[in-house]
Amino acid sequence: MKRLLAAAGLSLLIAATSVVSVPARTVAAAPRFGLVDQTFSVEAAGAITITLQVPTTITPPAADFTLTFVAHRPVDTRAAVADAINGQLPRSVDSVDLDPTLVARPAADQLQATVPIEIDTRTSGALLMSQPGLYPVLVELSVGGDVLAELITFVHRLPTVDEVPEDPMPVAIAVTTAHPVALDDAGRVIVDDPTLLELTELADLLETSAVPLGVRVPPAVLAALPGLGGEGVALAERLSQAMQRNDLLSSPILPLDPSQAAAADQQALYTQWLRDGEDSLSTSMSSPTQRTIVLIDTPLSQGGGAMLRDLGARLLIMQGEQFDGLPNTIGGFADTTQLVQIQVTPGVTVDTAIVDRIASRTLEKVTTNPELSAIYTVSDLLAARQQVEDIGGDPRRHSVTLATTDFSLPSATGFSAFTTLLAETPGLTPTTLDDLSVRTDQLLGPEGPIIVDLPEEVPGDISSRIDLRNELGLRGASTGSMLPDDDPRIAEWTRLVGVLPSSALTDAQTNGIATDLRRQYDAILASVEAPAGFSFNLTGTSGTVPVTLRNNADIPLTVRVRLTSSKLLPSDDQTVELPPQSFHEVKIRIEARSRGDLPVTLEILTPLGDVQVTEPVPLTASINALSGVGNLVTGAGLLVLLTWWVRHIRKNHRQRRAVEASHRHPATQNGATTDHDANDPDVTPNDTPNDTPNDTPNDTPNDRLDDDTELSPDAATSTLPPS
């Protein structure tokens, strides 16, 4: 618990001194020298060599002048450094006056002098700096007691082998291009003059920087450079060569806000764009990319933070102003030399480095005195290191992250001088953001690590663009399925639809692209003409229906033809290719469930999806034949009827033959007479009961002739009595 309380006290103390605003610079009574060159870090037995530029407002004295060096007590806080820069110097400890004989003139308007350093005794020709530290030094040029020019600088006196060494504190720098990526109305990257200028400045910074940088640059812009010709190719080569010494941070192929992507459930889209961006950067810059470091330059939500962590982010770089606005933040009391925990989901955190609030300001300022600006910035960083050490912290486990207030490129006027001095200064060690992430301790409070939440939501919404992309993508896929496989419009539509979610397009551009794509889709669909509604007859329950379609386009188009009706048996759709500028007959086979007039619908669809190419066409089918079961029943009935008629005819024929034969029978000839024609079997009124051909109750077996008994032809003609 004591360790946690001590760490908390360290954090609060550093924060309290770190967030003090640099006061307005006090206007000096005399013009200020320009600093051409100076020895900044000096050994205990060394000397300060300084070259001064005489202000243009005065005439450089030829003789009878004095150049005075005044050393003041060392400063050990950032606030004290700021006070000294603004003329509020601590008590002086020693001074040295040099006459013109000890001052060189490298140029007519320059003065150069060398002043030894001493640590034990005070002598007139050297400055006493008895202990290691950061000493403010005032340089004055005077003639006859009047100060003509002056300069406040710092000297970093290094420790001897017998003194406590200065453990180095890591310093990392992050930069990115700030000019927004823009697409034209065709969805292609615009590389305009401001973009080229910024990339040229980036190349200059990378080539002149003496320390490694963490660099984020839009992949699509870099990929577009070679398309500009010689100038673009040369710039791309410069950037590729310079990037070898720096860390190239991963970035989506086109701008896509992670929080907005997560809110729209587009984690897969962001992941794909991030991979595409990494592939593009690796190709154009010939350098591997780092996904573990993410610069947070837009509001970040819980969903966005969780997605970034899932994709491999292990260190977020965040501006102090943005950190101050987070839920349950400790604001300016956070020690920016340690890592803060950002909670992206319950129990899941990501280390976050807060950009230094003081030294970073100098990176974006334009300076006319780069050497002096570099000394001021490095002195501030040394004071920050000293604060950590004075309160018992280990500077090696703390770090400083530098960037401009919007991560844009630092001012080229002073960046080279600053990085050169940073690389040469003991007590500070330039490092990469990746190394910083593993060597810097987490910020602790009384209860453990300081954990800050992210907001659930942030401004901005891309859901409408996602819906538009899905709509146009589906229509493009279905309409594209009508075109030949090698039609270039298919790939172009896919590319245009794919860029719609990016903020590189304005809303007006997005609407324009959508309007143009819909027009192209509709034009292709309108090229196919279906026939007007018609009727057709089928003499059977199945057959083919000829349908004539016309393709008015200059290329062949493929469509899917479908006939549907509740009275038709289901059948597969027919995919056909329609020749350009011609009619084409399609024969569609159908099978009916019943007979009569049936309503049928003709549909012309795209090969993929069920997008209607034309309006449905109503048809009428007249089915004249019965169904298969009806035919079977009808045939069976006809067969039964035919069989009955044949049996009936044969029966009548046999009965007549039997009657004729009975007349010739001996029994009939002996006791019976007839008074009707032999060919007429019917009974006449003159017939006697014994003469009737029908059975009576008194008939004998020999006299009975059963109407239902059929005689064979031989029996019917026999003269023998029946047995």
Image: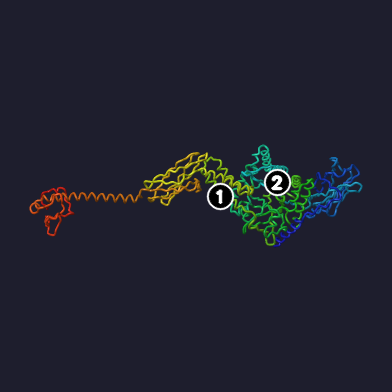
Q: Nearer the viewer, residue 229 or 53?
A: 229
Pointer 2 or 1: first along the chain:
2
Q: Nearer the viewer, residue 431 or 32?
A: 32
Q: Nearer the viewer, residue 309 or 304?
A: 304
Does 691 sit left or right of 31 as displayed?
A: left
Do the residues under discs 2 and 1 have CB atoms within 8 angstroms? no
Query: What's under tag 1, amino acid-wise?
Result: Glu
Asked which secondary structure carries label 2, the reply is: loop
Report the colour scheme: rainbow
Residue 510 lies, in percent from the top left, at 61, 48
Query: What's under tag 2, amino acid-wise?
Result: Pro
Q: Residues within 10 Å of mark 1 (few under 14, many from 20)?
A: few
Of labels 2 and 1, the one closer to you: 1
**Whether residue 590 is visible:** yes
Residue 319 lies, in percent from the top left, at 70, 53
**Whether residue 251 is visible:** no
Residue 694, quarter of the rendered image: bottom left
Toward the front, the furthest residue is 685
Residue 509 lies, in percent from the top left, at 62, 47
Asked which secondary structure carries label 1, the reply is: helix
Does 385 sit left or right of 464 as displayed?
A: right
Q: Which residue is mark 2?
A: 212
Does 582 sit left or right of 713 as displayed?
A: right
The N terminus, quarter of image: bottom right
Toward the left, the furthest residue is 670
Residue 16 lies, in percent from the top left, at 75, 58
Q: Could you give the CA–CA distance between mark 2 and mark 1, rounded to whole angstroms?
A: 46 Å
In the picture, the disc for residue 471 is 1
